[in-house]
């Protein structure tokens, strides 16, 4: 294990070393899970632009794209070790470090109000205060959570009810909570590495995949499916993490600048994402006119919403002693924000 860790650090040093020689600016390395042009990349580029402006070029943010530095697990380890300053990591993956963060994998847990969700994702005391100690135990600091858009379904048949998901193999993230959530909605959840999804859809070894519309377009999943289903059951949430040791070593001014910039970018992107979703949807329907787009009615959504109560109880059981308190605190925060923000 120690040898493997040192090997990864050595590879990271080789990958990053050249950039230090090319520029005298301090380099902050930032890894994302996907390719250039995706929502994660747009977030990273906005963060890069603002940080470089605020530091007058004293800091350069270098973005590394999906697979360049290995898996999400590899990137998380590099962040904890201080070899990477930031990484965009799915909350499903982070659930293996902090089980409580799987809260965001429960369908219908977030608000229908985007302003409420922006507050929850940037300021929630349940998340940022209540879970900070568990992140720190793994050498991590949670910097921000944001939405890449709704978790739409690209499928090989029309889905309008939980019954339509019977024996339906839905590809999901490798996340215990997502497995339970999709079981409760009626499907046969099938964890699968992202790089294998296109081929699995093409060969029909899976029946569908849940992803942001941007990823469905960028990864060409629409080419090998026939339906795009919007159940609006869940936002596809991502996190930005940093290493706790690296962050704590920064000056108080730098720490505040980073926190302020993360909040600014999250708010900016969560206003931009609905527009971007529509643009990617238009591209899909233009490039594949035969694609059938289904937006579920409120009555159809209610069938899935009713199933989510089972998932909430499974979250409580999975997390353990404080699971109910975490769930209750978060829902109370949501309710108070909905009342305050109408």
Image (cartoon, grey):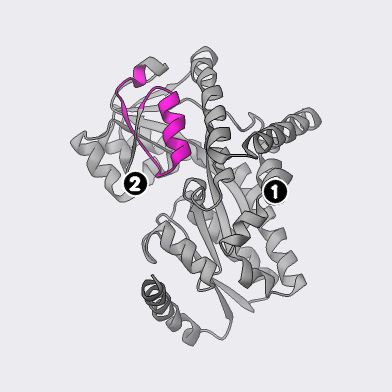
Above/below status of 60 relative to 292? below
* Residue 83 shown in magenta: no
Q: Secondary structure at mark 2?
A: loop
| Location of residue 173 by image quarter | top left
Whether residue 160 is visible = no
Work out how far the residue at label 2 is from the one at label 1, CA to CA, in angstroms: 36 Å
Above/below status of 71 relative to 245? above
**Which is more toward the observer, 24 or 310?**
310
- Mark number, residue 252: none
Tag count:
2
Give residue 259's position: percent from left, percent from top.
70, 60
Whether residue 131 is visible = yes
**Which residue is at the far top?**
299
* Residue holding disc 2: 219
> In the rendered structure, which segment of residues is drawn in magenta?
164-187
Instruction: Name which residue lies at 62% across and 71% down.
Output: 245
- Mark number, residue 130: 1
């Amino acid at each position: 294990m120690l040898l493997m860790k040192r090997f990864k650090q050595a590879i990271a040093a080789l990958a990053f070393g050249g950039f230090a020689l090319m520029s005298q600016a301090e380099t902050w390395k930032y890894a994302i899970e996907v390719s250039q042009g995706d929502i994660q990349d747009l977030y990273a580029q906005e963060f890069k632009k603002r940080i470089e402006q605020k530091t007058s070029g004293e800091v350069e943010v270098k973005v590394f794209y999906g697979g360049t530095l290995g898996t999400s697990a590899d990137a998380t380890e590099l962040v904890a070790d201080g070899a990477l300053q930031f990484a965009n990591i799915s909350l499903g993956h982070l659930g293996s470090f902090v089980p409580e963060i799987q809260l965001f994998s429960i369908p219908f847990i977030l608000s229908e109000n985007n302003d409420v969700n922006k507050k929850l994702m940037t300021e929630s005391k349940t998340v940022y205060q209540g879970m900070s100690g568990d992140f720190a135990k793994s050498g991590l600091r949670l910097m921000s959570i944001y939405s890449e858009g709704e978790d739409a379904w690209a499928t090989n048949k029309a889905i309008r009810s939980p019954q339509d998901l019977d024996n339906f193999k839905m590809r999901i993230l490798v996340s215990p909570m997502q497995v339970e959530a999709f079981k409760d909605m009626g499907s046969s959840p099938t964890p699968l590495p992202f790089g294998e999804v296109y081929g699995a859809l093409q060969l029909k070894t899976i029946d569908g995949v849940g992803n942001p519309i941007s990823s469905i377009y960028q990864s060409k999943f629409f080419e090998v499916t026939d339906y795009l289903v919007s159940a609006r059951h869940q936002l596809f949430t991502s996190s930005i993490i940093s290493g706790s040791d690296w962050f704590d070593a920064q000056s108080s001014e730098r720490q505040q600048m980073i926190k302020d910039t993360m909040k600014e970018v999250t708010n900016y992107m969560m206003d931009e994402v609905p527009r971007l979703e529509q643009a990617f949807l238009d591209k899909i329907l233009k490039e594949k006119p035969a694609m059938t787009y289904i937006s579920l009615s409120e009555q159809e959504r209610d069938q899935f919403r009713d199933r989510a109560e089972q998932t909430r109880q499974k979250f409580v059981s999975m997390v353990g002693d404080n699971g109910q308190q975490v769930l209750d605190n978060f829902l109370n925060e949501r309710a108070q924000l909905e009342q305050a923000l109408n």
